[in-house]
Amino acid sequence: MSRAGRGVLIVTGGGRGIGAAVARLAGARGYDVAVNYLADHRRAASVVADIERAGGRARAIAGDVSREADVATLFDAAFELGPLSVLVNNAAIMGGFARVDQVERATLDRVLAVNVIGPFLCARAAVRRMSTRHGGSGGVIVNVSSTATKAGSPGEWVHYAASKGAIDVMTGGLAREVAGEAIRVNAVSPGLTDTESHAANGAPDRVRRMAPTLPIGRAAHPNEVAEAILWLASDAASYVTGAVLEVAGGR
């Protein structure tokens, strides 16, 4: 059990961006943290080292969330830290910028595999461990959605927005399905956030260009999104389930 008795928090895609911010904040709040990553061990190990330097306990665990075998390995390895309390379904890809009439089938397959099938596989594994129906003692699932679902991101990535729309529906349905089994399920829907994902998808100046269009006048820092996620995971949100919390600067 963790130092504060909070148990284990798994964050998928925890090596960078919002996921890394969630991992570091969770460690500071007393969780033992399973930092899932796809390929960049150095980044994930750096997050783990930060948590350990601050007195926490963490482990980097490689795995592709769209693969059943990798998800099973992730949850088994996380269990070695202690009982699972929280799953943060954060891992996602944008698939690059493309109109619908230009997007490739391979891109669609990969975006939907990581962004939709992955969270379902991870949620399934979490419910099997947390649910009182399966002998568990309860827990929390927090999905990371996106405000791209509002307008659908025309001209940029309708494919990505559609995948996050599926996450919103999943959040509400699963929340109702397991509410009587001591599991709360919510989502955080970030708006424009200052992470390297924009550059990775070919638009390094996107945050600078778009920030002035937001009512608050700037992009979110990953830590601000992480704070919302950790609030939903906490007892302070004990009566909140099925919610999609926007962290979007008023947009």
Image: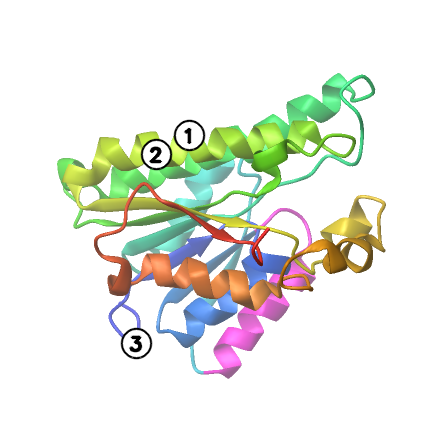
Q: Dominant secondary structure of the magenta stretch? A: helix
> Which mark sits nearer the N-terminus, 3 or 1?
3
Residue 86 in view (yes/no): yes
Quickly name the residue at label 1. Answer: 169
Decide whether residue 45 is among the magenta residues: yes
Residue depth check, mark 3 versus mark 1: number of the one nearer the observer: 1
For the point 42% across and 54% down, which residue is it?
10
Q: Provide residue 109's location: percent of width, then percent of height.
A: 66, 22
Check if mark 2's residue and mark 1's residue have beta carbons within 8 Å.
yes
Q: Which residue type carries mark 3?
A: Arg
Q: Is residue 176 left or right of residue 160?
A: left
Q: Provide residue 178's location: percent of width, then percent of height.
A: 22, 36
Locate residue 106: give its quadrant: top right
Q: Which residues are magenta?
A: 37-54
- Name the secondary structure under disc 1: helix
Quickly name the residue at label 3. Answer: 3
